[in-house]
Amino acid sequence: MLIVASVVAVEADKCIGCKACDRVCPTEAIITVNKLAVVEESACTGCNKCIEACMDHGAISRKRLEKPVWLRVDLESQPEEKVAELCAGARLHPAQSICPCTGTRAREVAVAILNGATTPAEVSIQTGVRGVCSMWCTSAVLRLLSAAGHSTESNPKNWRLYPDGVGPSIWSIPDSVADKYPEYRLRESRDALKSGDLELVGFPNIRQESE
C-alpha cells in the first residue's frame, strides 16, 4: 500500500527529449512523445526517479495533489487458498514484507496479479510496490509474476528491470551443480529449507512442527 501525495510535472521549455526519465520510471508513467516528456498522473507514484535522472536539466519537478491517492488492493477479492498457492510458487510467504519502503506484503502483490495485473508496472499501480526506491522489491514482484505464468523480458533501453538476475536461488540449483561443489553445502541448505518449521505449499515433504 502506498499513499501518493504528489506526482511530477514536466517543464516543456527545459526538456530536451533525452528519454532518461522514460528508462527509470517504475510504472511507465512518463514517456517521451515528439521529443517531450509527458506524464500520466494516474500512473505516477511520486518516486522521484525521473527528477533524479533529469538533474542536469531540471525539467521535472514535484506537483502536490489536492487529494492524496491510495494505491492498495482489496485482499478479500481473492480466495486465501489461491493467494497462498501463488506465493508458494514464488517461494514467498503471503505475510512476508517484500517492499520495505511501502510495507507491501507478498499477498497484496499476489492479489493484484490474480486480479489481472500482468506486468511489474501494473502491479505497482495497484499496490504501490516499487513506488519508492524499487531496489529490494522488484525481484519478488518478478518471481510472483513468473509463478503466475507472466514473463518479463530484458530491454537494454529500459533501466527499470533486470529479470535475468531473478532465476538463481537455492531451490533452483540443479543436483549436478550441487554435487560438483560440495564445499558449498548446497544440498544441505536446500534440505534445510524443505524440512524447516514453516509449512510451504509446493514442498511435498514439508512438515509443521508441533508445539
Image: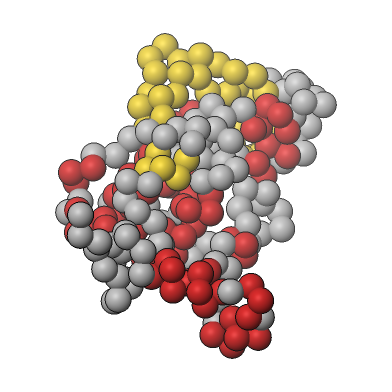
Q: Quadrant of residue 59?
A: top right
For residue 32, above or below residue 45 = below
Which residue, as the protein is rendered here, is positioned at the far right? Answer: 56
The residue under the point 66% across, 76% down is 183
Horizontal arrangement in the rendering, residue 146 relative to residue 26 (left or right): left
Q: How is the image coloured?
A: secondary structure
The residue nearer to you, when weighing 17 against 97, is 97
Q: Residue furthest top?
A: 66
Whether 112 is drawn above or below 207: the answer is above
User: Which residue is drawn at the image coordinates 20% and 54% (left, top)?
Assistant: 211
Q: Position of residue 180 (x, y in %)?
A: 65, 86
Residue under the image location 62 percent in, 62 percent down: 165
In-image side of 154 versus 102 (left or right): right
Where the N terminus falls, by quadrant?
top left
The residue at 41%/24% (across/down) is: 3
Q: Can residue 44 be seen at all in this image of the molecule?
A: no
Residue 61: x and y, percent? 65, 19
From this view, report whether residue 142 is shown above or below residue 63. below
Q: Position of residue 4 (x, y in %)?
A: 44, 24
**The quadrant where residue 208 appears:** bottom left
| Nearer to the camera, 87 or 169 | 169
Q: Nearer the viewer, residue 27 or 85?
A: 85
- At which x and y percent is residue 81? 19, 59
Q: Looking at the image, how many numbered discs can be counted on the residues?
A: 0
Can you tell which quarter of the image residue 57 is in? top right
Residue 195 in the figure: left or right of residue 25: left
Q: Nearer the viewer, residue 120 or 104?
A: 104
Is any atom of residue 191 visible in this view? yes
